[in-house]
Image (cartoon, grey):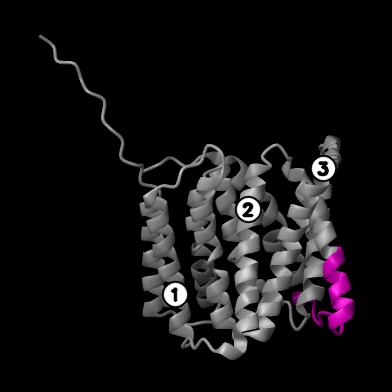
Amino acid sequence: MIALTGATRIGLGAIALWSLLAALTAASGNVPPFQLAAMTFALGGLLGCASWIVKPTGIAALRQPLRVWLVGVSGLFGYHALYFAALRIAPPAEAGLINYLWPLLIVLFAALLPGEKLRPAQVLGAILGFGGVLVLIFSKQDLSFSGAYVPGYLAALGAAVIWAIYSLSSRAFGTVPTDAVAGFCLATSLLSALCHLAFEVTVWPEFWSQWLAVVLLGIGPLGAAFYCWDFGVKRGDIGFLGVAAYATPVISTLLLVLSGFAEASIALAIACALIVFGAFVATRPSRRARPVRSRQS
């Protein structure tokens, strides 16, 4: 198997944090999506700014070309805006399944990056991972794609494409420090706040536990996770991270089971097996010609 570098392991930390997203979002109460995004991305951005106390030079990372800002903000805000729209227009199961094409897109298009090569093992691993997500979603709800929800499906597909492009662009902008993500988060918070004021009615958390969930969202899944992901895709194995991302919905479901919000099932076990096997396949080294040993006379 291929040894995972420290950067790849940090990227896996983002996947682990994203697995907490469903449980913490449920625990945050009835806060509207854009309002929740505005609150949590503000916390996520401030989390990055806090590191400048230890490393004052980190603020210099905000001085980036316009194209870097466009990619960063459109990645974070564009993805979440389209995903929220998809969940409003189309059934969540179908929208979620289409959205989870982004790890496969990362694996397929990573080969277009300089110095990267598409390995069949990674493609097979990504397909197995997508199969695990498919099994998990089918076990919860029968999928029934309808023409009436095409705009929602397109929004979900757009979200998947945007996140794949954002991840691959982060790799291409390898010289841009991860500290710049703080600026992207704060800009996303501002845009989310404007969308909230335009389309939603403000609903604040009612209990301290809901406020705690919001804070944890901003620190973890919608905060530190983006810094870990940026560092991982820039310096780690982006193909493997794409495959490993399929573990997110399964770990999320496992956490819901452990917390009593969902029940264990055979489908969950099958999904786990497919995703673990897919990750195993993706880390298999490519076949290379073995060196010819000289014969001793």
Say which residue appears at 58% left-offset and 65% top-offset: 19
Q: Position of residue 143 (x, y in %)?
A: 48, 86
User: Is residue 46 rendered to the left or right of residue 93?
Assistant: right
Measure the alpha-carbon separation of dots 2 and 3.
17 Å
Say which residue appears at 82% left-offset and 52% top-offset: 183
Q: Along the line of sight, which residue is nearer the eye, 290 or 29?
A: 290
Q: Position of residue 223 (x, y in %)?
A: 73, 58
Q: Is residue 32 above or below residue 176?
A: below
- Residue reaching furthest top? 297
Q: Quadrant of residue 271?
A: bottom left
**Residue behind mark 2:** 167
**Residue behind mark 1:** 134
Badge number at residue 64: 3
Q: Along the line of sight, which residue is nearer the eye, 39 or 128?
A: 128
Residue type highlighted by circle 1: Leu
Residue type highlighted by circle 2: Ser
Would you call the spot at circle 3 few (<14 residues within 10 Å), some (14-19), or many (20 or more)? few
Circle nearer the N terminus (2, 3): 3
Measure the alpha-carbon separation of dots 3 and 1.
39 Å
Q: Quadrant of residue 56?
A: top right
Residue 261 makes an appearance in the image: no
Mark 1 residue element: helix
Residue type highlighted by circle 3: Gln
Instruction: Locate the N terminus by quadrant.
Output: top left
Residue 157 makes an appearance in the image: yes
Q: Which residues are magenta?
A: 190-211
Circle nearer the N terminus (1, 2): 1
Q: How many marks?
A: 3
On whether residue 198 falls in the magenta region, the answer is yes
Q: Position of residue 92 (x, y in %)?
A: 59, 82
